[in-house]
Amino acid sequence: MFTHSLFWLPSRADREGGIAATFKGTCMFFALRLLLTLCGFTVVLTGCETAPVSGRSQIMLVSESEERDMGLKAYREVLSKEPLSGNTQANALVDKVGRRIAAAAERPPEDMWRAPHFRWEFKTIDKNEPNAFCLPGGKIAVYTGLLPITRTETGLAVVIAHEVAHALARHGAERMSDQMVAAVGTAAAAVALSATVSGRSRTYLPAMMAAVGAGATVGFILPMSRAQESEADRIGLVLMAMAGYDPREAVGLWERMRAANSGKKQAEWLSTHPADTTRISDIKRWLPEAMKYYRAR
């Protein structure tokens, strides 16, 4: 809540020549208040959603139809540039596992989430990278460089369930919403800085604004990204269990991923993913929850 008075009376300093500067500061203040108020109204009007399994509250400023349209366009663009696998066995395995996981996502237990009714697609990209990605609307791709690490069908199920979880929890729309909120916050900080910085200090204003932007990234966007990755791990364990894959295999998969990533470590606070040790520890903690849904096929 803002308690700044709506009425402004000039002080003696103002009357002696500082009126213009004070008036500018007052205008900046009201611009800042309007910006933050509009942001607040936007969040209230769109409301919050609840993530599957974890129950975490999510702010969504992007509609489901917008999210799906953007996901489909991005997916088509990626597939037009990346080489698709010609290995029929690998392609069939990725599609088989993907379909089983997607079927589980479309049959939520105990109303844990809304059935998304996505047009699921699973593609294999012929590239020697240990990678996979998910785009909004259930558009998922697995790189062939990941298959030596997944090793088995169940190992592959860990990866695909994680990607399906991203789609199910609408992490793409949430990420876009987070960036919109961060952009408003950065703009508000710019207004505040412009109102308070004067004279020679204004020379350093661009550098100060760059620092504000970096603060938004490290302090908000990246931590939310790590939260989404951890959440996708947790939801993924439940999904693969529902699909008849043993979720305990997730520990071995991420231990192999850790070995493959050795020598490529980055400080966790600057990473979009949790550290491997953190990830494995969390998965072990969530396994009892997932095992309630596991029935071997």
Image (cartoon, rainbow, N blue to C red):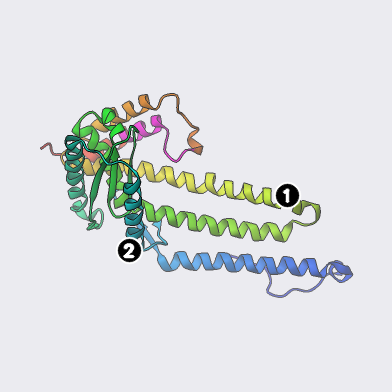
Amino acid type assigned to the residue bearing label 1 in the image: Tyr
Does any portion of residue 286 appear in the rendered image? yes
Tell me where the magenta segment starts and ends, as one range. Answer: 271-283
Q: Is residue 175 left or right of residue 290?
A: right
* Quadrant (top left, top right, bottom left, bottom right) of the N terminus: bottom right
Task: Residue 65: give its label.
Answer: 2
* Residue at the right extreme, as displayed: 16
User: Distance from label 1 to label 2 (Cα)?
Assistant: 43 Å
* Residue at the left extreme, as displayed: 297
Specify which label sits upstream in the sequence, 1 or 2. Answer: 2
Query: Quick check: is 149 in the magenta stretch?
Result: no
> SS at mark 2?
helix
> SS at mark 1?
helix
Label 1: which residue?
Answer: 204
Q: Is residue 64 left or right of residue 4?
A: left
* x 32%, y 63%: residue: 65
Amino acid type assigned to the residue bearing label 2 in the image: Ser
